[in-house]
Amino acid sequence: MTNARYALAKLAGRVPELGATRGTDRASITPEDVAAACAGLARGPYLIALAKYAHDWSGIAELERIIWLEVVDIAIRPPDGRPWRIPVGQEILRNLGRAAALEAIEEPLCDECSGRRVIFLPGGLVEDCEACAGTGRGRYGAVTLAASVGVSLPDWAHVWGPRYAIISKIPYNWLYTAVLHINQRLNDDG
Ligand SMILES: [Zn+2]
């Protein structure tokens, strides 16, 4: 397991639970409640929360465009200061943004613990699942991501995977913002 993967797992686990401020009764929160509570959010957090928690995908094309623009900004001014070389005529940046948004929305279960957050060891011992940092949430695999972005597996491993790790923070940050906002609103109403 790479450090990048661990960092991403922690990132996923950072998004608070929907309805956390309302006690444990998450089942009572309807998609309509969530949609109403999203009012007032900025566009990116609004659209991703609507898709993830209210199952409303009507804004997905706009979400893709917004995240694409963010990815372009990062490509021009990346954290290490060295602008990315982008193959001409390919939609790599757009595809990276789309994959990151979908992954944050779907949050597949962790392969290692199947979402249980812990690993059962021989002798009745239990320990936190290291692969997902105890979040129970997994990531798309490199093969899936390379294919959906349209690059070779070696290119993914050496070039685009590390860049994707940077891009992945965008939708998670949006979700983080959105869930805090939604929980606040649900709490006000409850
Ligand atoms: Zn796990």
Image: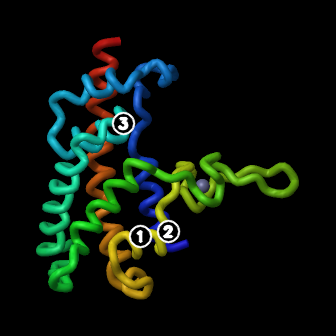
Which residue is at the front of the view, 30 or 15? 30
Which residue is at the front of the view, 65 or 85? 65
Work out which quarter of the rendered image holds the N terminus and state it: bottom right
Which class describes the residues within 10 Å of circle 2: few (<14), some (14-19), or many (20+)? few
Q: x and y percent of residue 12 in the render?
A: 42, 52
Secondary structure beneath disc 1? helix
Tell which quarter ligand 1 is in.
bottom right
Instruction: Specify the label residue 55 is tagged with.
Output: 3
Drawn side of residue 148 relative to residue 64, left or right: right
Instruction: Specify the label residue 77 is tagged with.
Output: none
**Which quadrant of the structure image shows residue 19?**
top left
Name of the residue lying farthest toward the right? 123
Whole-angstrom CA distance, mark 2 to mark 3, is 24 Å
Q: Is residue 21 above or below residue 84?
A: above
Whole-angstrom CA distance, mark 3 to mark 1, is 23 Å
Q: x and y percent of residue 4 in the render?
A: 43, 70
Is the CB of mark 1 within 8 Å of ligand 1?
A: no
Drawn side of residue 29 relative to residue 66, left or right: right
Name the amino acid, label 1.
Leu
Work out which quarter of the rendered image holds the C terminus and state it: top left
Residue drawn at 19 percent across, 28 percent down: 39
Is the CB of mark 3 within 8 Å of ligand 1?
A: no
Q: x and y percent of residue 158 in the render?
A: 38, 85
Whole-angstrom CA distance, mark 2 to mark 1, is 6 Å
Q: Is residue 15 above or below residue 6?
A: above
Q: x and y percent of residue 85 in the render?
A: 18, 85
Secondary structure beneath disc 2? loop
Which residue is at the front of the view, 55 or 126? 55
